[in-house]
Image: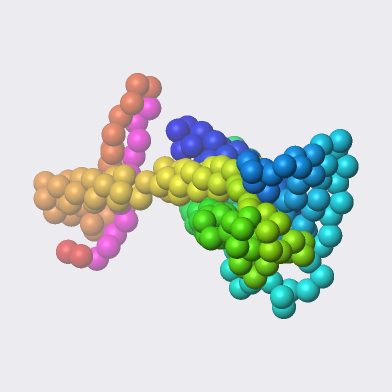
Amino acid sequence: MAASMIQLIGFMLSALGQFLISAATAMDMWGLQDRSFTVVTNVFTYSGLWNTCVGTSSGTTQCRPYFTILGLPALLQAVRALMIVGIVLGAIGCLIAIFALKCLKMGNMEDNVKATMTLAAGIMLLLAGVCGIAGVSAFANLIVQSFRFTTYADGGFGMYGGGGIGGLTGSLTPRYTFGPALFVGWIGGAILFIGGIMMCLACRGMAPDTKQRYSLGVFVFAYIMQSCKCSPGCFQNNTQRPLYSSPGHTHFLQVHSLGLL
């Protein structure tokens, strides 16, 4: 019961984390313009993995996608790849976890098969969470470096290096800070990582207890051998000997001729 509950909670956390990292990847507010020293505050810029946008205080927004990947820095492309890999691994892990749920009956699927599927899903969800956290952290590091080395006076660095994305250079080069998408990605990756850990822990409780079966077999064999010491001809004839008794029932063990004596 505990393993089934841990597995269900891990699956729900993994599904929530998968939704959050997918939403963070699609959001445009990864980097938000710092308006601390700006005179005009009703117009601001922000950018994400796929678009760069200009927004106003009245609520209007105009976005322009990155038309080429050749002019983008390698780190931004690596962040894209990490987030996409995390989404794919998380989706596959959640799909496997659905069929591995112990509370769902899928034909004659045994518990050891479901335990193996749960472990595989947990490992995939762990990797998905690591990819999501790594991608968001890499982009955050890019923003930190851009913020430290970009000023409104020198104009030497844009957010992605080399004079800014929107063509604003010189004394008008904007500085960027953390956008909401970064926090959504961090939270989603952490939840996905925790969900993967819980799925891996649930795998141990779902595996069949083979040690108990082995102990019962050893007990039966020892009982037979102990009975044969008292009766040397027990292997010669087919007999029924009582194995154990319960109220109203007596269980017998059929001993066949083994030809050992």
Range of the magenta residues?
249-259
Q: Is residue 2 above or below residue 148?
A: above
Where is residue 93? Give x, y as percent: 60, 54
Where is residue 35? Give x, y as percent: 67, 43
Residue at the image point whose x is 81% and y is 50% from the top? 54
Quarter of the image where one finds residue 187: top right
Residue at the image point whose x is 23% and y is 45% from the top? 219
Where is residue 110? Give x, y as percent: 54, 50
Image quarter hosting the C terminus: bottom left
Q: Is residue 138 above or below residue 57?
A: below
Q: Is residue 47 among the parts visible in the rendering?
A: yes
Residue at the image point whose x is 61% and y is 58% from the top? 153
Q: Residue furthest top?
A: 247
Quarter of the image where one finds residue 163: bottom right
Magenta segment, prevailing SS (helix, strand or loop): strand
Assess whether residue 163 is covered by the magenta stretch. no
